[in-house]
Image (cartoon, rainbow, N blue to C red):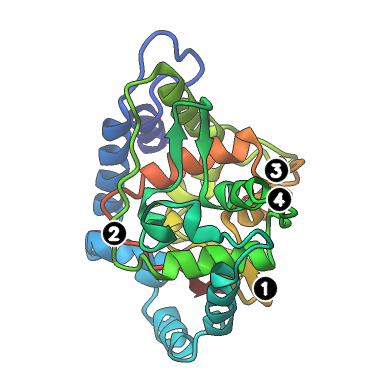
Amino acid sequence: MKKKFALALGLSVLISVPALTSASPEEDREALINHFKKAFPQVPFEDYVNGVYALDADARQQWQAIEEFAPYEIDVEEGQKLFETPFANGKSYADCFANGGIGIRQNYPYFDTQSGQVKTLELEINECREKNSEKSLPWKKGDIAKISAYMAYTARDKVFDIKIPDDPRALAAYEKGKQFFYAKRGQLNFSCADCHIYSAGKNLRTDLLSPALGQATHFPVYRSTWGELGTMHRRYEGCNEQVRAKPFKAQGEEYRNLEYFHTYMNNGLPVNGPASRK
């Protein structure tokens, strides 16, 4: 119990009264890394991109066999076709993104000082469509996940570098995401941290709980339980449902802020999405 309290204090200082004092984002990240170094000293930092497979050698072998014929390969190919197909007005996704949308996944999400909100990759994919008089895509799966998967694939091995600009609104968005991560919710009264920090590496029924460190690096993800590719916000929704809490809207402020905090914790790790998971 003392260890849990100390970690919660280090990562989320005085969350209930954030006006008094708070750890900086870098202090939060360093505390998270140090926690996992102590919990799993045999696991190299860079190996956390492999999620639970960094902790379980047997499961890792099975997963590596699956990755040889990755179930998301067709989705990446289809995502490339969708990405490169011009809109009715002749423009394309490449016209909406820096570097033509290639090799930029490591910069998302980011805080947009003009709009005053966190922008995710999927949000900007649909904004690009709307800007070019195209209909928005459903947020959680299907074409938007395929396009996002292709864009992630072009950025593989690039290191996440999420910024918190010198803007009080950006820090506030980060703090809201952090509060969400540690807040208890649902009939089971669980937080994200309960499963993925305090209980990482432990069994929940037949599943080994993955560590929070590295979780954001491999999205969109192909999950065997879905039988298809899905976005990070689809996974957030599923986690909320599993603790019997009412999910928030995909790409709503709550999940975008959560993704901002969650991905910042992964700074220094490389993009390895899309990936397959159980």
Front label number (2 vs 4)? 4
The earlier-in-sequence mark between 2 and 4 is 2
Q: Residue at x 59, y 50 (%)?
A: 128
In terms of image quadrants, where is residue 265?
Answer: top left
* Crowd class of label 3 (few under 14; some 14 to 19; many from 20; radius 10 Å): few
- Marking on residue 225: 1
Amino acid type indicated by mark 1:
Thr
Q: Are marks 1 and 3 in contact (CB under 8 Å)?
A: no
Report which residue position mark 3 lands on: 188
Residue 229 rendering spot, x and y as whole percentages:
62, 70
* Crowd class of label 4 (few under 14; some 14 to 19; many from 20; radius 10 Å): few
Marks 4 and 3 sit apart, C-alpha to C-alpha, by: 44 Å
Amino acid type indicated by mark 2:
Phe
Taking depth in this image into account, of 228 and 244 the one nearest to the observer is 228
Front label number (1 vs 3)? 1
Report which residue position mark 4 lands on: 133
Q: Are marks 2 and 1 in contact (CB under 8 Å)?
A: no
Residue 59 visible in the current orientation: yes
Amino acid type indicated by mark 4:
Ser
Marks 1 and 4 sit apart, C-alpha to C-alpha, by: 35 Å
Element type at mark 2: loop
Report which residue position mark 2 lands on: 40
